[in-house]
Image (tube, coloured by chain):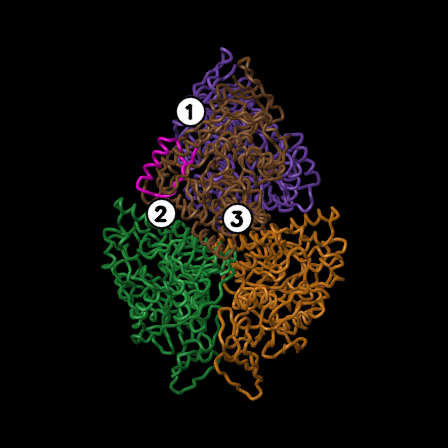
Chain colours: A brown, B purple, C orange, D green
Amino acid sequence: MGILIKNGTIVTASGRVTGDVYCDEGTVAAIGVNLERRGAKDRVIDASGQYVMPGAVDPHVHLALPFMGTVSADDFEAGTACALAGGTTTVIDFVIPSRGVSLLEGLREWDAKAKGAVSDYAYHMSVTGWGESTAEEMRAVVREKGIPSFKVFMAYKGAIMVDDHELYQVMKAAAGLGAVVMVHAENGDAVFNLQRELVAAGKTEPKYHAASRPSPIEGEATGRALMIARLHGTTAYIVHMTCRESVEALARAKAAGQHCYGETCPQYLLLDDSVYEKPNFEGAPFVMSPPIRPRAGGHQDALWAHLGSGILSAVGTDHCPFTIEQKRMGKDDFTKIPNGGTGIEERLALLYTSGVCEGRISLERWVDVVSTSPARIFGLYPRKGSIAPGADADIVVWDPAGERTISARTHRSKCDRNIFEGFKVKGKPSYVIAGGRVQFDNGDLKVERGAGRFVRRESAGAPAPGMRAVPA
Amino acid sequence: MGILIKNGTIVTASGRVTGDVYCDEGTVAAIGVNLERRGAKDRVIDASGQYVMPGAVDPHVHLALPFMGTVSADDFEAGTACALAGGTTTVIDFVIPSRGVSLLEGLREWDAKAKGAVSDYAYHMSVTGWGESTAEEMRAVVREKGIPSFKVFMAYKGAIMVDDHELYQVMKAAAGLGAVVMVHAENGDAVFNLQRELVAAGKTEPKYHAASRPSPIEGEATGRALMIARLHGTTAYIVHMTCRESVEALARAKAAGQHCYGETCPQYLLLDDSVYEKPNFEGAPFVMSPPIRPRAGGHQDALWAHLGSGILSAVGTDHCPFTIEQKRMGKDDFTKIPNGGTGIEERLALLYTSGVCEGRISLERWVDVVSTSPARIFGLYPRKGSIAPGADADIVVWDPAGERTISARTHRSKCDRNIFEGFKVKGKPSYVIAGGRVQFDNGDLKVERGAGRFVRRESAGAPAPGMRAVPA
Amino acid sequence: MGILIKNGTIVTASGRVTGDVYCDEGTVAAIGVNLERRGAKDRVIDASGQYVMPGAVDPHVHLALPFMGTVSADDFEAGTACALAGGTTTVIDFVIPSRGVSLLEGLREWDAKAKGAVSDYAYHMSVTGWGESTAEEMRAVVREKGIPSFKVFMAYKGAIMVDDHELYQVMKAAAGLGAVVMVHAENGDAVFNLQRELVAAGKTEPKYHAASRPSPIEGEATGRALMIARLHGTTAYIVHMTCRESVEALARAKAAGQHCYGETCPQYLLLDDSVYEKPNFEGAPFVMSPPIRPRAGGHQDALWAHLGSGILSAVGTDHCPFTIEQKRMGKDDFTKIPNGGTGIEERLALLYTSGVCEGRISLERWVDVVSTSPARIFGLYPRKGSIAPGADADIVVWDPAGERTISARTHRSKCDRNIFEGFKVKGKPSYVIAGGRVQFDNGDLKVERGAGRFVRRESAGAPAPGMRAVPA
Amino acid sequence: MGILIKNGTIVTASGRVTGDVYCDEGTVAAIGVNLERRGAKDRVIDASGQYVMPGAVDPHVHLALPFMGTVSADDFEAGTACALAGGTTTVIDFVIPSRGVSLLEGLREWDAKAKGAVSDYAYHMSVTGWGESTAEEMRAVVREKGIPSFKVFMAYKGAIMVDDHELYQVMKAAAGLGAVVMVHAENGDAVFNLQRELVAAGKTEPKYHAASRPSPIEGEATGRALMIARLHGTTAYIVHMTCRESVEALARAKAAGQHCYGETCPQYLLLDDSVYEKPNFEGAPFVMSPPIRPRAGGHQDALWAHLGSGILSAVGTDHCPFTIEQKRMGKDDFTKIPNGGTGIEERLALLYTSGVCEGRISLERWVDVVSTSPARIFGLYPRKGSIAPGADADIVVWDPAGERTISARTHRSKCDRNIFEGFKVKGKPSYVIAGGRVQFDNGDLKVERGAGRFVRRESAGAPAPGMRAVPA
């Protein structure tokens, strides 16, 4: 059974046009004018006055993540359901082997968890240490498993942090594989010490989380990761950038001709650190790393400006919520509050409202940063991130007239808090088509446990020209 | 008679995909997989192994331009034929009324000249002074004539230069009309004085042209134009950027959230000021403003870096050649050498060779900067710059295996010099389809005088949020 | 009769040391340890626990200035008395010939007015237009009159503003004379238009003065002036810098190796634009150009940082007060409010309090920016700005334990408003010795009308290496 | 016996003046005009036409340093003799305890070696690891030993490198002591790996030393050290800065208001990496870390610009020569070439020639960067670095008409190579007075083994305001 979407404004990253899209057997069969049904049973969707866009790709989620002694509140089934309800048809989760566990063993754990996924998904592979076999495992992960992107953490000392030697090795190995290296950029040694000092001084409330990770700590690590990537010609992708210092470091690298990317998240664009002042431990849901930044530093303005300029390439969520009960593990010590918040369902609407409707970014740029760019950067394109012949029939019909108020009472996440509680947003999906099936139909979510497929990806190939003294 | 392009790699600004394109009645009717001929007479083009891309848009050409006492060597017929042969299916020329001549009178002159065009074309309207009726004329030009982009010259003192007061008025009026203001950014007063001093000192050879317009003069004017645009929320587009100082000024504006664009040209990316050292007045063909820059300042590297980063948005040509005989008007005084050179036919191949093949920009970014971005910025999209349902059937089939050596002996321009003489380039069009007709067919150019159409454009609408003390 | 200052902490721009200073016949005769009186009548001042510093130099004052239809409230006698009372022993006023009046004629007017000065003084010469004889007059001003510094205004359109052509000529002529060019950097065309628009919209209150001159207007002009200076190798000195954009432009020029200077004033370091919100026209005393800046832009922080880093070289006052009655000329139109405020008496204490006591700059840097640097930049050193053998005996004994509250009720200015009203400051002069006489003695000001001398200065000599196409 | 220096141009960091200086009992007794001998035996030096300046301070030397398996070629006696002959009257050497050796034990070793010094000297204390007692030892070093400056190495992995955790601790402890932290800023992990890869690839010649430490590696570490210092409000001093990336990082920190310093060395200002191309292992004498930089990156221009602007504060030498025989330890492996070169005798003349005579810096700035600033930053002022009452009688009479050619054949160093071989320099000391004795008298060096004194220093006191979450 095919689907014919008629008369919508088809929006891609590069422009918009009025036309029709016909999907069949799970893929896009044609884009054209005055297309007609091919089969009598084909469903026809009238998209007049609405936007027809490629299903969004969330490049940064953590579902069922064991972290800081607990597990993030949304598992693959719940998280991908949220995603679909918000217009996101593919998510990329992070396999995070514990330090000492092999990459392939980690991958097996994740495969088991991901079975419940209702949307398509892919993985990034985290490298949390460096051993004799790591390079070989990285090769297998890319070549055999279809996972050509790695993640390193410059923070979380004593747990999953890599030091500069390890970072160098990962960057070098990735360059040889044509893989992207994603970086959580914070100086973990500085954070570790500031945390220790704060707690020792009795400063244990959630707001001290922000104090323990000031923005220069992120800016520094961003510059360091980019430098090491540059030595090898590795494509670096800095995740969840939050501050002026970081985006300025990224802009400097790009001005020097470096091939690199930056991602931010809705919470860093829209919130400020006053959230940590909420009474009754209600700042805890906002405890994530890096933290939400103060308004005074101009961080949010800088992120918006660089999202518009193209210096930032993508908006992910870092969706990794914990219930207030889970957050209470750090009731007496902010360093024990599990880090993370919601966003997977709200990302498109938040960006549409504050970005497109308020004139900060164009409609096309919105599609780009939530869908096309993540798909291209991570090798999902054109299967994902496009409305193109042969692409997966992952399509969102977006109703610009939609309105709703975000709330934990109504969201689909299993978490009992939403960090965007009370935000009034504009625009909402009318239809979300994924894999050729209408899975969200005017508010009605129809998903099937396990229907999501793992998406293999290809590496981008050879590294960019770097500065390496010795060719790889 | 339709055209069916089969099995090509369809490349857009946002990605590439394998598929078919069917054109009918001058527009794109469908993009899909396994498309079939609709009529028996439909021509089928096998694009296997080749790129199928939207016809390119040259946002910056000067055909039959009366300038410095002569007229540029390519008229509309010749220039647009060159364009088609090189893969450019739409050009935007500049109406330049002499100072004191009304905009609408200038437009009539241009309309007369443009009748011979063989490709589609549009105009930008130059504002070379400010009078009581200029604002009203600007409104008519946008609203009635379909020309929502204006050009100002901060150089050419005593001729078409505007001062800051005039620049302010143009920016203000354009903001109210939702029009783009294009800026030739050089400090005309400084140039005027340096020219005078050089000539007085007997320094009259072509190489002193470069000495009379050093890069800080361009960087300064770029910053000034952007500031005045920012006051009004006007969208500024800086043409033919050549140097580090300029692109850094543009990058600063974008980092501050300003809505603005920058264009460069192949000659500024690929040549350096050693061209002015050629003996026997053979530096004269390279006399253009701004001039070609020295390698030592890192200008070319900066332009490439910012083309890759997205800070620069478009590559035009500023095609405005003069024969060596015409150039000889300035044999004894470089200030009298008519300014300008070739490029309209060579732009795509030059960028493909030095940009894509050498790994500086992606294939998609190449399509973006030569076609999609110019089309979007100037309101031609989706009719131009896209392969989308309903778009004009302006399509290039690009053969990546093509090779040739650029030479004035073989180019189609009427000019007897080519500033890229001897450049070996890769890639060439196999087919150029414009308006639904195959006008270039494996080396065979089949054009019809006057077949080119004037393309009306719509303004982008309201200005971006500016800093104006008084709302417009 | 000599003066022997014993046991003070002698503070210079480069360090501090405990010792004695002996002055005789109006100059410093010796600095040493355990110096003794040479004559029985020598006065001995015990400076234990106090700072002994060179008399301060205010490089930027306007006394008895005819401006905007009135005359600034402090004449030379009053203004220089204020200066002495505050620790400033030399002021540099600006000769400002009306447009069309010759430089030498202007100088004669100023000489007449300056006769009442009670402290030493010098002049800068303003060039407010460019005529056939201007270059020759500039030569005479430098060579014959001992005035090797010129001032240009890029603002005040229709009055004393120079355009870029004129600016170019002044910079060129000054380079040939080894003279410094001081620049009031605001884009006068933009200001003129914004003023007109605001007034036309009925926005006539003092606060719209700030709205008519936003900081990008100053930043732009700063960059432009520096570029034109760079072409000639002229030493530029940007006066009264107020904003982040301006100091960043200055820092960029210095990073490129340009020889240039920047000055700020206490009001730009210490106040913010909330002063314009005062009711009952009490914002008018703060109307000056450029205006006081908003706190949110980080302007004040940037000025302090660059004062500490050395990018900014001097702190002047732009002392040019008008009484509230005079300010009322602009009661119904802010563009008619005479521009300017107080500062000549308060400068040292304000900087000492907010700079030294609050740890932003060192004691030595304070001496540098209020005394030594202005003296060196403008050719007064070592006669002024130093405690050195043969230097004028202009010495301040500064009591760090002093305290007072600034108020128009107690200041010595003839103006009835003080823009620092209510500021509590630390430190005050115990003794101010000028020309070898104790003119301020623990609060008791003993001055003699006309005792101030005009100080001839030498030009610095040849210009710095510039970028001029044609050597001067 | 006193010394009376008559009629010289006394040059300090803040200006110049003609006058006399009288020294007695090892200190400066008076500066004045027409001073007369106090004792009949007083020596009178006629300094007419010459500069009288404070003896220079070299803040960065390594005498008799055990390093990389050998010992630097000049011991304290030889090195300080070179210093005196060149106009440097005080040197600051680095105590470098081996990793695991206590600071105080290291100090005892240095005290033993320093006994032969012929000029005054002080120490910086290197911290090469972090243990339980390190903070306490640091306190003793500052408070009891008079050494308020520490040094850390971010390079030399496996030997004396500190990691970020250790760097954090040192910065924190130093802030509490009001001590300066000096930083060798290179990313040691990156260097270590690049070295390993180069050697493994058979790239073992001296020129690969430069390839193993490209400038981004230094720029990154500079930014990192400054960030960690900023967290604590520690005063950081980046030693031997060589490249654009580093000085830009320093400039950014200063623009943000951070209290920090940068030092460069003559070799980085004057040489370029072509020195490594010398045949017959003659590139080895130039092997030092960081390495000499390529001309193309604009590094040397950037260093000069920032030396002029004040962003860089001091010029040291990093004097640490090894004979060609010693260098041959790395004949087959550049990583084994002992790092370091000459400079202690040549610093003043090199800077005078290329800085002052070529118009890049003023005479005063020259005195500042070679003498006054190092003295002030490290707490030697006013005893050193000044000509002030009570200061040590360390004075250089500098003959601007002097000329010589630098050569290993004529230099006083024990090393058989001079990295400035063949440089023609202008200016030379006529007299070098140290501790009140004429130790260099028109080419005749009269020194006494062991006459040099250790100079205790005071810490600057409290740290600058930092960003620390927990007050120290």
In this picture, residue D149 sits left or right of residue B97: left
**Contact, mark 2 vs mark 3 (Cβ under 8 Å):** no
Q: Quadrant of residue C53?
A: bottom right
Are labels 3 and 1 on one chain? no
Percent position (x, y) of residue D63? 31, 66
Q: Which residues are magenta?
A: A122-150
Badge 2 or badge 3: first in the primary sequence: 2
Inter-mark Cα distance, 3 to 1: 62 Å
Give the crowd class for mark 1: few <14, some 14-19, many >=20 residues within 10 Å. many
Spot the residue most to the bottom.
Answer: C40
Queried whether the magenta region covers residue A126, the answer comes back as yes
**For the residue marked with disc 2, what is the amino acid?**
His
Decide: few, some or many residues near mark 3? Use Cα within 10 Å; few <14, some 14-19, many ≥20.
some
SS type, badge 3: loop
Q: Which mark is residue B50?
A: 1
Q: Which residue is mark 2?
A: A165
Q: CA distance from mark 2 to mark 1?
A: 44 Å
